[in-house]
Image (tube, helix red, strand yellow):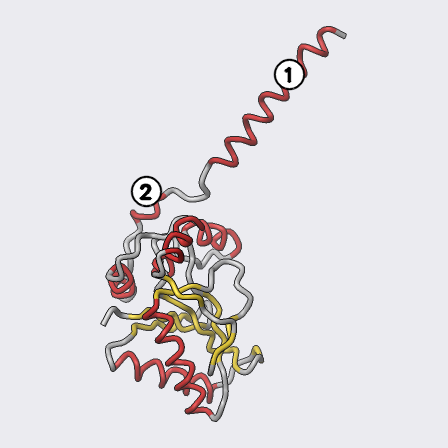
């Protein structure tokens, strides 16, 4: 009986220590994340995002700091020409200029299509969000993403008016709007085939 009582504290102590370590450890290694070189196509997106003087968003606390300072603008769940889907791995906040351009893109798209709307599928992500996303989506960026600076958003080109299926006519209309703002020097965008979305980053013009 005495032996049994002596063993219990040892097991309990080990279990508690293991739980404490798991809680304090991060799900990403910043050193490794920073080693990943962006592609030539993606580099302008990162450069544009860094120009807004926002540091890499590591955690919820980092995002909250920019919210408190007035640097980030809350994104409405629905606006003219767009709707934001339920966000599991990103947050509905953007730097003010990015929010303004999302509103303009949505408004122009609505006007050009007689009132249609597109779906925003991802907005601002912390490194923790990105790490969690990578566990369920192997295509998620291994390195730094422009989403990590609060300046990028993804627009689905297979979800229009609440319907999830390809619509070549509305897809073309959406890309025409994006090209208009790209030509005006306001945004960069990439058509991501694996995610069926346009990755949009706003320039600090």
Classify residue 111 by image quadrant. Answer: bottom left
Residue at x-position 26% and y-position 57%: 53
CA gap between label 2 and label 1 equals 37 Å
Residue at x-position 37% and y-position 81%: 104
Outermost residue, top direction?
Answer: 2
Image check: 205 left or right of 96? Answer: left
Task: Give percent across and percent down for residue 170.
Answer: 46, 86
> Is 169 situated above or below 127?
below
> Is 204 situated above or below 139?
below
Mark 2 vs 1, N-terminal side: 1
Task: Give percent across and percent down for residue 164.
Answer: 57, 77
Outermost residue, right direction?
Answer: 1
Callout 1 environment at 10 Å: few (<14), some (14 to 19), or many (20+)?
few
> Is 127 situated above or below 91?
above
Camera-side residue of 205 and 175? 205
SS under mark 1: helix
Camera-side residue of 167 and 107? 107
SS under mark 2: helix
> Is 31 situated above or below 4?
below
Classify residue 7 by image quadrant. Answer: top right
Task: Give percent across and percent down for residue 67.
Answer: 40, 58
Callout 2 environment at 10 Å: few (<14), some (14 to 19), or many (20+)?
few
Residue at x-position 38% and y-position 71%: 99
Number of numbered markers: 2
Mark nearer the viewer, 2 or 1: 1
Quadrant of the rendering where the N terminus is positioned: top right
Image check: 98 left or right of 6? Answer: left
Q: Residue 9 carries which label?
A: 1
Task: Give percent across and percent down for residue 47.
Answer: 24, 61
Q: Where is mark 2, residue-wise?
A: 31
């Amino acid at each position: 009986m005495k032996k049994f009582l002596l063993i219990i504290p040892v097991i309990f102590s080990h279990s508690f220590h293991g739980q404490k370590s798991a809680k304090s450890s991060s799900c990403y290694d910043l050193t490794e994340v920073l080693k990943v070189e962006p592609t030539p196509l993606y580099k302008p997106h990162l450069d544009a995002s860094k120009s807004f003087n926002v540091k890499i968003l590591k955690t919820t606390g980092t995002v909250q700091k920019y919210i408190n300072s007035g640097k980030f603008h809350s994104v409405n769940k629905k606006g003219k020409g767009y709707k934001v889907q339920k966000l599991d791995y990103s947050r509905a906040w953007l730097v003010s200029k990015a929010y303004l351009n999302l509103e303009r893109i949505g408004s122009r798209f609505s006007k050009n299509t007689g009132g249609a709307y597109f779906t925003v599928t991802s907005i601002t992500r912390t490194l923790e969000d990105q790490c969690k996303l990578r566990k369920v989506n192997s295509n998620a960026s291994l390195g730094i993403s422009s989403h990590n600076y609060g300046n990028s958003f993804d627009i689905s080109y297979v979800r229009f008016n609440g319907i999830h299926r390809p619509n070549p006519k509305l897809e073309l209309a959406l890309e025409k709007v994006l090209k208009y703002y790209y030509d005006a020097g306001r945004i960069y965008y990439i058509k991501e085939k694996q995610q069926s979305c346009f990755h949009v980053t706003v320039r600090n013009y």
